[in-house]
Image: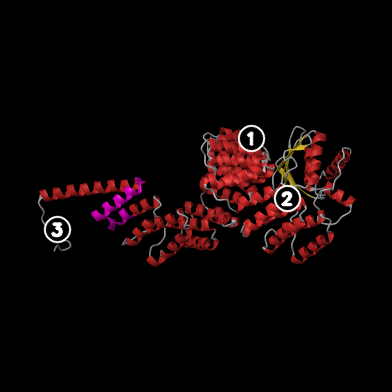
Amino acid sequence: MRRRGLVPNLNPNFLSRQNNLSFFHTNGHSHLIRNLQNCNNFIVASSLHSHILKSGSLSHTFTANHLLNCYVRLRKIDLARNLFDEMSEPNVVSWTAVIAGYIDLGQPRTALRMFGEMPECSVPPNEFTFSTAIKACSVLSNLRTGKEIHARVEVCGLRNNLVLCSTLVDMYGKCDDVDGARRVFDAMRCRNVVSWTTMIATYGQNARGHEALQLFREFSSLTRDRPNDFMLSSIVNACASLGKLAAGKAAHCAVIRGSHDANEVVATTLIDMYGKCGCLDYSYKIFRQVSCASVVPYTSMIFSAAKYGLGKLALELFDEMLERGIKPSDVTYLGVLHACSHSGLVDEGLKHLKFMYAKHGILPDTKHYTCLVDMLGRAGRIDEAYRVAKSIRAEGDAGALLWGTLLSASRLVGRVDIAVEAGRQLIESNQQVAGAYVTLSNTYALAGDWDSVRDLKREMKRGGVHKETACSWIDFKDWTYVFFAGDVLWCEQGSEVVNLLRELEKRMKERGYVGGGKGLVFVDVDEETEEEILGLHSERLALAFGLINLPKSATIRIMKNIRMCRDCHEAFKLISEILERDFIVRDNNRFHHFTNGYCICGDFW
């Protein structure tokens, strides 16, 4: 036996042979590692695994980690875990690889359980392990565990790690803790385009578009970095959600300056933004500029056409997509059904619902059947819509959307019996309670059942339920002006607004307009008072403000947080004809483009 510290006498020939063998082994091992790094085939990976076993290299953690990463990359997580469990000394790289593999395969809970086992095995996580575990919390929207990991990050002295901080910002955003995300962002000593993008996206994803736009302005003024395609997509999405056309056009200019207009993701967000801002021609132009469009831009364009009431255009785009061999997704079919619903194309909608599974193997879910309920209800086939709703098992938000759709449809056709059941379903499930009360009350009002209206009001008061306040807003000179029904005292031009509306009311009555016939009212009021209330609805106030301040050549664009009432819809048609102006109203349901006494919805909404 050789004693430690003593070196046997070896002749030069033996040393030469050993050096050659060592050189061969090193080269052979490097070649093996390169093969593992480049491997994208399971059979090859199995062969390399066998070779490693025969050579005895599996006991080397470095080699085993490369094999582990190979299996994770090939999405063979069970084999990766078996290999990990067989390793004598898995290090932090080994742990991180398997944890990341579980997340990539949609098993974030398993990933977090494994992360929790690391302290027991005396393997401290590094910044990459922390980042991977935080990503699992993002996927699960698990704020509690995310905060616990954040605390460990602080204890380990990694609070200034750029990648970790960006991941934490994303996690807080995905968990709806936007203020928590901003605190992490503000505490960062240095930021790159990724961290700025993550914070901007967090604002956008949490319906705080104004703050997203403000942060983008700060990024542009404080840094010399150029926005990447992800940041620009987030900004364009924020403009879309806010309906800010001017800001959207400015973002589009930034896209062109940065040569990002060829990026399909950015182009798709632009299609969506212009569609949501009521510029369908712009949407269509950008869509046609996308080379080799995939299912994503097609779906976005189909939805834009659907929202605009152009059902036939949406179906033509869908047929074109199929002719090009592009397979539709479940979201694409949602857009198709939405288009059929808003254009009264019931037979086409039923045909496409049938073809979803028959031709493309896509099983309809609750959202598709909700579209069907909406489609049948709008077409007056309320009993069929009711049977569909009763046959679907839906809970939570999906159930609320289903029954809320049926409630609105039954109100439109005056079916109090169905409206009552749909409303009670929503109230008892504690979903969309205020909206259910209001719609149900309006159904009773249209039927002349004022006793039931009063009972509902008392019930709402006892339960502390408050209906959403209707408002409309319009952009003018970089400012957004918000109007509430009957409230013009805050506006410097309030008297001008009211006077203009009174003048327009007179001119409409000369053409036979009678207000109040089909409006939605929540209280029993006399005819004169009702007429006054309708005349000062928020969308009319916004319209008058736009007519006073915007040039005659400009299209007036108004946003409203609830559905536009029929009386205002009729009034807008007449005013567009009287003044020869175009108006676009985006309510919470669809677009209305008024021109020459006509609306693109064809009075079908």
In percent of the image, x 81 and y 60: which residue is there? 453
Q: Amino acid at mark 2?
A: Ile
Picture quarter with the N terminus = bottom left
Mark 2 residue element? loop
Q: Are marks 2 and 1 in contact (CB under 8 Å)?
A: no
Q: Amino acid at mark 3?
A: Val
The answer to which image quadrant residue 277 occupies is top right
Residue 52 magenta-highlighted: yes
- What separation in Å lies between label 2 and label 1 (alpha carbons)? 26 Å
- What segment carries the magenta color? 38-64
Q: Nearer the viewer, mark 3 or mark 2?
A: 2
472, above or below 171, in the image: above
Residue 520, horizontal then vertical, whole percent: 80, 51
Instruction: Determine the main secondary structure of the stretch shown in magenta.
Output: helix
Please state if 173 lies on the left or on the right of 491 as rendered: left
Please state if 41 lies on the left or on the right of 576 as rendered: left
Task: Pick whichever, 524 or 559, lies toward us.
Answer: 524
Mark 1 residue element? helix
Q: Please report whichever mark, 2 or 1, sits nearer to the chain's N-terminal start.
A: 1
Residue 268, horizontal then vertical, whole percent: 57, 40
Please state if 68 lies on the left or on the right of 585 as rendered: left
- What separation in Å lies between label 3 and label 2 (alpha carbons)? 88 Å
Which residue in the protein does label 3 denote? Answer: 7
Q: Are marks 3 and 1 in contact (CB under 8 Å)?
A: no
Q: Amino acid at mark 1?
A: Tyr
Q: For label 1, count other residues whose C-alpha is less than 10 Å away and answer few (under 14), some (14-19) or many (20+).
A: some
Q: Residue 282, which numbered label?
A: 1
Q: Please report whichever mark, 3 or 1, sits nearer to the chain's N-terminal start.
A: 3
Q: For label 2, count other residues whose C-alpha is less than 10 Å away and answer few (under 14), some (14-19) or many (20+).
A: some
Which residue in the protein does label 2 denote? Answer: 562
